[in-house]
Amino acid sequence: MAKLVDILENFPFSKEDKKPMLIKKSEYSTALYPPNNAFTSDNTFTMVTTDTFMLGIYELGPGGVFAPLDVHPGDESYYILNGPVVQRSGNGQFAYLETGEGLFMPEGAWHCCHNFSDQKARILYFITPKAWSEEIPPAVIPSEEETKFYKGPNNDNLPNMKDKIKDISRQGCTDDIGSWPVDPKEARETGAVYAVRDFEKLNNVHGVKHPMLMRFITSNDYGHFGEFILPAGGYGPRCSDPDSHAGDAALYCVDGPVTVNLSELEESYVLEPEDTFFIPAGVKYQLVNFEAKPIKVVFAITEL
Ligand SMILES: [Fe+2]
């Protein structure tokens, strides 16, 4: 398999050659991250890396952690496929995340992730607009001793985060689209990280005649990330209203199979669970559910 650095911004197509594409689980590009020490790596599966975003999965074995800390020149959001995991930030925040929960991490926030469970952990991540600069891993990385943690030797030299972490328990509304779970600019300044539990997702209904549940984990000027839940049943298969986005997007199938219908192109694709579909900016699509159960996909959209 290719090195992560070699496929960056050009997988599964070059960024000049974007097109709608089904990317099967078996076609994901695999790598260890970091690539230079398997003892402290996670097992990484890259679905899409282009000039507007990166979507991938990483796995941590029981008791595992990836090291050293990581950082991105873009926001990173998580959807926990198999938890629990503990996301460690350099600033002393430790987010305990169960299966199905999310995370918002503003650009520039140092992080790693621990698996304290007896199961393999799997994390779906979305980084936008830019995942890495030229250096993978970054050239200058703080040691864990330089970060904040219980009785850490460097705690007094790091900012006190207590007043910088916002309360996100307020129920959201449609007007919160674009600033969920918090105002992104402020979070990028303070470096505060937010676990977004199931009850903290921003719920909206997509479509009136053919309603589909849309649950944002994050929504801001860099991107939008969350769940589509399309129920079963209808006159014919249950379909969502066709939609298109101003930016590139991808769908990851959690509960399926689900059919992605490109209504103007008259092409359709079947996503089995764990498959991904890339949707270039401007391409109209709808989800079609032929099953006798609700289907769930995670959406990653750079501009609605
Ligand atoms: Fe990361």
Image: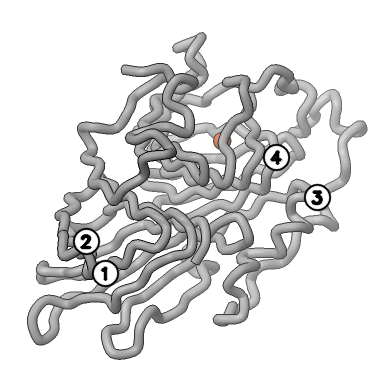
The residue under label 4 is 109
Q: What amino acid does circle 3 point to?
A: Thr
The residue under label 3 is 190
Q: What amino acid does circle 4 point to?
A: Ala
Circle nearer the viewer, 3 or 2: 2
Q: Position of residue 126 (x, y in %)?
A: 49, 46
Q: What amino acid does circle 2 point to?
A: Val
**Residue 16 shows up from this direction:** yes
Q: Earlier in the sequence, mark 2 or mark 1?
A: 2
From this viewpoint, which residue is outermost toward the right? 156
Q: How far apart are marks 2 and 1 (CA)?
A: 6 Å
For residue 72, which quarter of the picture? Answer: top right
Q: Is 224 displayed left or right of 81 in the figure?
A: right
Q: What's the mark number on residue 286?
A: 1
**Secondary structure state at the residue bearing disc 1:** strand
**Secondary structure state at the residue bearing disc 3:** helix
**Secondary structure state at the residue bearing disc 2:** strand
| Dot 2 crowding, Cα within 10 Å, few <14, some 14–19, many 20+ | many
Q: Which residue is drawn at 36% across and 75% down?
A: 213
| Dot 4 crowding, Cα within 10 Å, few <14, some 14–19, many 20+ | many
Kindly tell me whether mark 2's CB lies below 8 Å from ligand 1. no
